[in-house]
Image (cartoon, grey):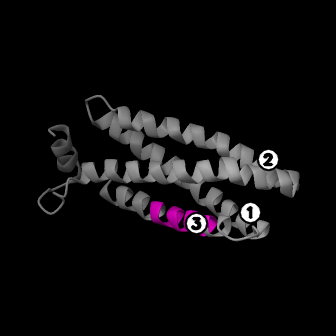
């Protein structure tokens, strides 16, 4: 389980790198649509797999931790909201209309990037609370989760 958390956090770093590259394109005088589309496609490819794995991990926590689990529910709800932004961006890309793409990037694209960064930061903080920095003394993942239950 600890390895799963570190894997998720490593994917978060990859996602943030892509978001930084996309931001760089937004700061140029003229947007290079092909590069932006490629970055969003790379992000989508990573995100789909990441989202599934992360939701499985959150489901595991929800089953194991016998106390209210609002963070897990909130994160999964945010994943659902991201799908709306993805759809707007994907529809704009598929339209092959650069004006429509520019509008979608400027609205949903920027909003999606901001929300995704905030979401990743909140998840990282949440996952860090499970590790509790006691992995050196804990005998198992179960002991680490038991420590969390007592916080």
Query: Which residue is located at x 34 percent, y 34 percent?
Result: 63
- Dot 3: what SS? helix
Q: Position of residue 34 (x, y in %)?
A: 78, 68
Image quadrant where one finds the C terminus: top left
Q: Earlier in the sequence, mark 1 or mark 3?
A: 3
Direction from residue 105 to residue 58 in the image, left or right: left
Distance (Cα) linking label 3 and label 2: 20 Å
Discs 3, 2 touching: Cβ within 8 Å: no
Q: Which numbered dot is residue 115? A: none
The magenta region covers 12-23
Name the residue carrying label 1: 37
Q: Which numbered dot is residue 91? A: 2
Question: Considering only vertical position in the picture, is 69 above or below 126?
Answer: above
Looking at this rendering, what residue extends furthest in the front direction?
Answer: 29
Direction from residue 98 to residue 148 in the image, left or right: left
Image quadrant where residue 9 sits: bottom left
Question: Considering only vertical position in the picture, is 101 above or below 87?
Answer: below
Q: Which numbered dot is residue 18? A: 3
């Amino acid at each position: 389980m600890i390895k799963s958390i570190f894997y998720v956090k490593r994917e978060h770093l990859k996602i943030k790198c892509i978001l930084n590259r996309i931001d760089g394109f937004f700061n140029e005088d003229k947007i290079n649509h092909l590069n932006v589309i490629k970055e969003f496609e790379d992000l989508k490819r990573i995100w789909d797999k990441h989202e599934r794995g992360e939701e499985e991990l959150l489901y595991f926590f929800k089953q194991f931790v016998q106390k209210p689990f609002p963070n897990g529910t909130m994160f999964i709800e945010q994943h659902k909201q991201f799908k709306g932004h993805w759809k707007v961006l994907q529809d704009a890309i598929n339209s092959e209309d650069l004006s429509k793409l520019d509008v979608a990037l400027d609205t949903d694209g920027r909003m999606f990037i901001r929300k995704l960064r905030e979401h990743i930061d909140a998840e990282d903080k949440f996952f860090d609370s499970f590790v509790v920095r006691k992995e050196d003394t804990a005998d198992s993942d179960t002991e680490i989760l038991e420590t969390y239950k007592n916080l």
